[in-house]
Image: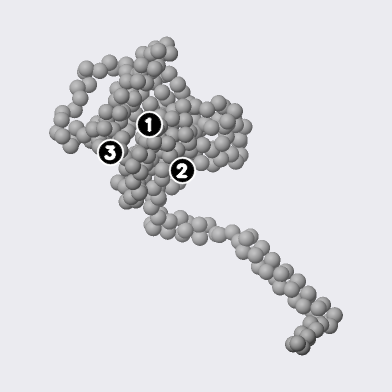
Amino acid sequence: PPPPPPPPRRTSSLANILNSAGTFLSAKNNSQASKKVSSYKPTQTERLRAKSEARRSMRLNLILFDPVPGNQIITSRTLDPLRITTANGAKDVRSCEGILRRVLAIYPYEPLPAITFHAPLVPAYPDSPDCHVEEIVSLGCHQGAILCAPNRISCRLSYVMMKAFLLDHCHVKLRSCRPFDECLATTASKLRILETLRLAAIDDASKHGAQPHQIFISRHAHALIPYVAVIRNSTGRYLNLYHQRLIEEERKRTGEPSEDESVHDPRMPLHLLELRR
């Protein structure tokens, strides 16, 4: 049989003490070094240099799908003088001028109860010709309008708008999704469905007793200025901004003349779904 293994080598108590002391001192030095790094505060000159470098080298494009800070509107307006809530910290992004280039913000119009803290956020963007912001009110309710559910027209519209934004402005091509692409494959099919939805929404508001050209549903939002809201009107010439843009692009492509404004009731809102300031 093989010889038994040698017994483990025992270190002296002095060696154990020295090893423990070395481990403790090493941990203490690392802790002090990490504290020095974490407590470092850049100077004003370094901050300005970093900001200048960011403006020179960074380009930021955003898709905001129903951004919700999780605060009550009354809390952010009246009970937050120190501006520590998420809503007050994010409602003003004008300092991003030179970095923020394009924004697509989509707001489903259906509100949730106030107790769910789901008031949307409508930030103030840089007032610059280099910053293009498109705020579109769409169908659906919060994240329910972005689920992978081809049977929901609100999800299909969200998919088409985001896909076009990523491809046209960010040069990002999404993998095709047949259930979503089949229904809204061409501009003509999109316009046909959007017009059908517009007429159905007008008929639905009329059945519920809504007055013509009036606000039917409103969803108040966090913003720098008061009384900003996501609105569903009882009537509208277009379903939303996306509907209007598609019609204008199709007219330019086909050479069709612009629509005569005199044939429309001036009291009728331009969009049935709109963001009102």
Q: Which quadrant is the N terminus positioned in?
A: bottom right
Single out the mark in the foreground, 2 or 3. 3
Give the residue type at disc 1.
Ile
29 and 142: which one is in front?
Answer: 142
Mark 1 lies on residue: 153
- Please, is residue 99 above or below residue 106 in the view? below
Q: Is residue 126 visible?
A: no
- Percent x, y for residue 16? 81, 78
- What residue is shown at x 41% (from left), y 38% (from top)? 105
Residue at image position (57%, 32%) is 117
Residue 5 falls in which quadrant of the image?
Answer: bottom right
User: In the image, what residue type sits under mark 2?
Assistant: Val
Q: Residue at x 21, y 18 (%)?
A: 262
Q: CA distance from mark 1 to mark 2?
A: 32 Å
For the image, the number of numbered tags is 3
Which quadrant holds residue 159? Answer: top left
Q: Earlier in the sequence, mark 2 or mark 3?
A: 2
Q: Which residue is mark 2?
A: 93
Say whether residue 103 is visible: yes
Of the pair 197 and 68, the residue shown nearer to us: 197
* Label drawn at residue 112: none
Q: Residue furthest front?
A: 1
Side (left or right) of 167 relative to 119 = left
| Element type at mark 2 | loop
Residue, disc 3: 185
Q: Residue 86 in the image: x percent, y percent? A: 56, 40
Q: Earlier in the sequence, mark 1 or mark 2?
A: 2
Q: Residues within 10 Å of mark 3 (few under 14, many from 20)?
A: few
Up the image or down, 216 lies above or below 20; here it is above
Please name the amino acid that badge 3 sits on.
Ala
- Whether residues under marks 1 and 2 lie with C-beta atoms below 8 angstroms apart, the answer is no
Is there CB contact under 8 Å for labels 1 and 3?
A: no
